[in-house]
Image (cartoon, coloured by chain):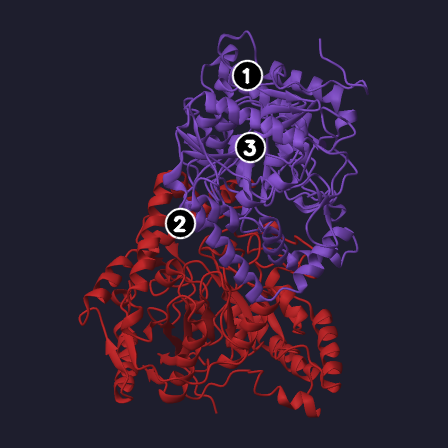
Chain colours: A purple, B red
């Protein structure tokens, strides 16, 4: 029986919570004891039950998903599935184009807009046999202003953003996996708020699609397990490839075996100072367990290279704002002229209009310096560890200080995420924490292109570390 | 009086041909002896006269252009123009989005498609006060299959491609400048065929827009003079910025002063061996003049570093095919499913489907090696010089051997252009050659980010070198 909070909602317990996984049940498709169609119908049942509260979806296309699942049934019946994700129902963040559904980007400007195209990643998923269930809610243009989605574990809390619907859909067990993307904190933060596994891969590893032309846009995967996560990422990489000019996701088709990291760098980032005591305490309990498992933990106090790195990344949130607002100012100008752009994005545009080409060059140079500082850490440890969020999901009306006048973050503070976005480093969040009955995440961060071994460390973490609940 | 060819068409003579320039007549807008509206009307008259034969335009928006010109009139009347290109009528290659015209990308798939958006570069031009006259014909998705455009100097010859309408419109004096882009040979080659000045800037220097997600897509400018060319490029750089993640175009607002290069590397590239004797002879006449002007010319026979570079770039055409077909295969798959993709692009897709992620990585690595070889040349010379095309514009039905079975180049051979596209190096073509009564170009190539001094060398070339006609 699920424990109930004072408000009658289920309390999230990371040691008990079970998600709707796919890879581990898929074997039953081969012997016919389960089918992709039955799996999909269970997903659709959960959606029907929970969607009125959670509001994760902008558009559902049940007919097309059912047809894709039936075709998948036949392939399994013949013993000939297209891929390890054949039959896996997937949700698509509504900034990515889909040929059978509108792509609205969280803006009334694009209400009902049909592009009749599949983004590279969606094209890859279809070729791999995955039924596309629908489009998930995003904040406006994947920036600040939230859609209607609520947190699956507390309807008065944010699911996080910008991949709000993606996170909530996976967290609520509506689908085993969904696509999101991150330019500041949009994958790892909402995934942590909703108890998901998620990967923000190395920059460029997965083709991010058209329509949001940003130099630090990362396409990533939210999933119910690390196996599901890796399978989806790998299929996209194989069938759609990388962002143009990038070498793509490295690693074989199977998830890396669990691998204990010998040494981990414990990162503070901008997040630690903004983190509540309870979440800090939960993180310390994880670190204590790592110590017990003979993982050597090193921090900025142990090594000057780490101290230099922490200083290099300490203004990442504002750096991300400068980079992203400058890169999209031409689009914001177009949107503003429609009269349908939010106040918040108008403020981003105002700030962007004050930037010169030299300011942008300086920001790129600062980002490159950060990336050099990251590479200098490579000899010191197998990976880095930190929190995924400054605390559990705040209330829907919470305004997180952005550090700049004029706008606030409305789907939680990205202070633990902006650095990895700017760095282009791979990050994986695992749902190991429960804080006051809500999920929070532990984040592993690697060097560029270490996605596969990083997933192996994440797997070890799930095997070796007991989930921590504090309240 | 213009000399006539046997077929009754005017023979192009580079020493006599005058284009419709803008910067040098603009002064008259301030004293009221000329106005942007009058200038535009002269452009529209030329369009009305020549368009039935040349077919440079997919869409014209004369009303909006006239309105923009009237607003420009008022600004000059007040002595307060927005920029040096305020009032300059400009054409836009129809792969770039325009809010007031469809963006069809040379494909029936996108016939009449309105995006209601201006691409970054178009947004910049409007903010700078330039009336947008219309959309110029492109080959299908800026690849192989040509549109209806003919060469302004021979209606039975190709204008080149993919920026076919852009080149022809500028070459015919319909507009003083137009935008194009290049991933293989699409700016420099057609500009040479049509007698234009054009710049393919350093990779990423000008925001290339959405919709063709290619790692070596360069936005560039065709113009009637180097002054016009630089003014347009500079305004785009200032107001729209670079491609995301790139530092953008370097250099002040004014065209560089004419600067004699002390040393030039004479490049063969893949083009020299594919070049006819008459064009080779014309190029040698230019080199002889450079010698006479005490410019030191060095070749692969003078320096091993140059020899290594020539070898590094000798398979650039096929490298470009691999990179571009892999990067757009997801889009080609979408297009193919409509049944409206050309046979040629279906072949590109077939070839792309045979490529693995590792093949793509190998191609990127080869490209990076080429770029390193280019950087090694920096100490040797001020710039590089070669032809812009293997000869004058071939007939409309000419098939240029691609070096691969299955497809041919239908708007001329890009053998002198593929290398600079892969290298991301800036290239400028100047109309110094007449071959059998048709234009051809001399190409200057620089190190990355040397666009501004390169334009200064191009300016010196126009001042110091007599145009060469051979027939």
Image-based side of A387 in relation to B298, left or right: right
Number of marks: 3
- Chain label for disc 3: A
Camera-near label (3 vs 1) is: 3
Q: Tell whether B388 sits left or right of B86.
A: left
State yes or no: discs 2 and 3 in contact (Cβ < 8 Å): no
Do badges 1 and 2 share one subunit? no
Residue A156: quarter of image: top right
User: Looking at this view, is A341 or B404 the one in front?
Assistant: A341
Q: Residue A323 at what x, y percent from top left?
A: 58, 55
Above or below: residue A446 compared with residue A326:
above
Residue B381 image-quadrant placement: bottom left
Question: For the point 68% across and 33% down, which residue is it?
Answer: A165
Q: Chain of mark 1?
A: A
Q: Residues within 10 Å of mark 1 (few under 14, many from 20)?
A: many
Q: Chain of mark 2?
A: B
Q: CA distance from mark 2 to mark 3?
A: 26 Å
**Secondary structure at numbered mark 3:** strand
What residue is disc 3 on? A221
Q: In this view of the protein, which residue sits in the foreground, B278 or A260?
A: A260
- Check disc 2 and report the residue beneath it: B323
């Amino acid at each position: 029986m699920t424990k109930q909070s004072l408000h009658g909602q289920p309390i999230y317990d990371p040691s008990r919570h079970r998600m709707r996984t796919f890879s581990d049940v898929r074997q039953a498709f081969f012997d016919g004891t389960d089918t992709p169609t039955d799996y999909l119908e269970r997903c659709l049942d959960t959606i029907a039950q929970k969607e009125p509260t959670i509001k994760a979806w902008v558009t559902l296309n049940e007919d097309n998903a059912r047809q894709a699942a039936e075709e998948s049934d036949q392939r399994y019946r013949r013993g000939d599935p297209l891929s390890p994700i054949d039959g896996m129902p997937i949700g698509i963040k509504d900034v990515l184009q889909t040929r059978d559904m509108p792509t609205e980007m969280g803006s009334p400007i694009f209400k009902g807009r049909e592009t009749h195209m599949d983004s590279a990643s969606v094209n890859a998923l279809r070729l791999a046999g995955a039924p596309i269930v629908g489009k998930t809610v995003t904040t406006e243009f994947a920036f600040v202003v939230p859609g209607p989605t609520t947190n699956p574990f507390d309807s008065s809390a944010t699911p996080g953003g910008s991949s709000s619907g993606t996170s909530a859909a996976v967290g609520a067990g509506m689908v085993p996996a969904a696509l999101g993307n991150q330019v500041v904190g949009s994958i790892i933060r909402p995934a942590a708020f909703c108890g998901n596994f998620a990967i923000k891969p190395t920059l460029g590893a997965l083709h991010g699609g058209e329509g949001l032309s940003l130099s630090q846009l990362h396409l990533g995967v939210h999933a119910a397990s690390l196996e599901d996560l890796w399978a989806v990422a790998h299929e996209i990489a194989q069938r759609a490839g990388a962002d143009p000019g990038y070498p793509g996701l490295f690693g074989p088709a199977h998830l890396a075996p669990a691998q204990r990291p010998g040494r981990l760098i414990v990162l503070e980032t901008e997040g630690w100072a903004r983190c509540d005591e309870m979440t800090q305490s939960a993180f310390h309990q994880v670190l204590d367990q790592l110590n017990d498992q003979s993982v050597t933990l090193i921090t900025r106090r142990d090594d000057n290279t780490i101290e230099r790195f922490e200083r290099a990344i300490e203004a990442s949130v504002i750096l991300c704002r400068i980079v992203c607002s400058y890169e999209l100012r031409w689009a914001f100008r177009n949107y503003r002229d429609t009269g349908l752009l939010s106040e918040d994005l108008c403020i981003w545009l105002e700030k962007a209009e004050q930037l010169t080409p030299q300011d942008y060059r300086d920001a790129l140079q600062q980002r490159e310096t950060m990336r050099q500082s990251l590479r200098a850490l490579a000899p010191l440890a197998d990976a880095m560890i930190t929190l995924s969020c400054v605390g559990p999901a705040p209330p829907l009306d919470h305004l997180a200080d952005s550090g700049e006048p004029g706008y606030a973050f409305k789907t939680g503070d990205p202070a633990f995420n902006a650095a990895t976005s700017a760095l282009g480093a791979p990050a994986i969040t695992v749902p190991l924490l429960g804080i006051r009955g809500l999920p929070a995440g532990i984040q592993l961060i690697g060097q560029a292109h270490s996605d596969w071994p990083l997933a192996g460390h994440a797997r070890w973490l799930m095997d070796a570390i007991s989930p921590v609940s504090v309240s």
